[in-house]
Amino acid sequence: MKSLSILFALLLSVPAWAAGTEYQLVIREHRFEPIELRVPANQKVKLVVHNQDSTPEEFESHELNREKVIAPGAKATIFVGPLKPGRYPFVGEFNEKTARGVLIVE
């Protein structure tokens, strides 16, 4: 019974982002979908980026201080925040002309 209490206590300590602040981005035809992604301010956010193209792409954002190469067909998890309200642009560095988006923090 004591081990059940410990397990319950551990489950209660799971970070809040695990419950519902996971956001999906897709890379398709060298473009991010959606182009604008709205997320809450002052919370840690989990971005799951799925590269559906047949070539690698790099998620890059100087404002978010993140860059991650994502292989063709692969998914990558990128944690950001907590962030202040504002606009945080990101690009696919290998296709900057078309792969553009913005994280809108509200």
Image (cartoon, grey):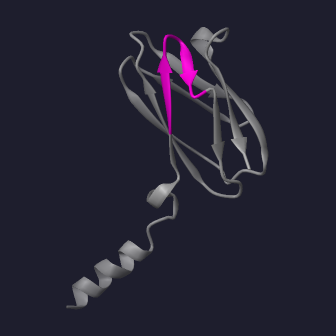
In depth, the one of 25 and 44 nearer the eye is 25
Residue appearing at x 51%, y 58% in the figure = 17
Could you tell me residue 53's position as x and y percent? 42, 13
Residue appearing at x 37%, y 75% in the figure = 10
83 up-or-down from 59: above or below: below
Q: Main secondary structure of the magenta part?
A: strand
Quarter of the image with the N terminus is bottom left
Residue appearing at x 74%, y 50% in the figure = 106
82 up-or-down from 13: above or below: above
Could you tell me residue 89's position as x and y percent? 72, 29
Residue 63 on the magenta span:
no
Could you tell me residue 104's position as x and y percent? 71, 40
Specify start and end residues of the magenta stretch as a single range. Answer: 24-34
Residue appearing at x 45%, y 60% in the figure = 19
Residue 31 on the magenta span:
yes
103 up-or-down from 45: above or below: above
User: For residue 82, what is the image quadrant?
Assistant: bottom right
21 up-or-down from 62: above or below: below
Could you tell me residue 2's position as x and y percent? 24, 91
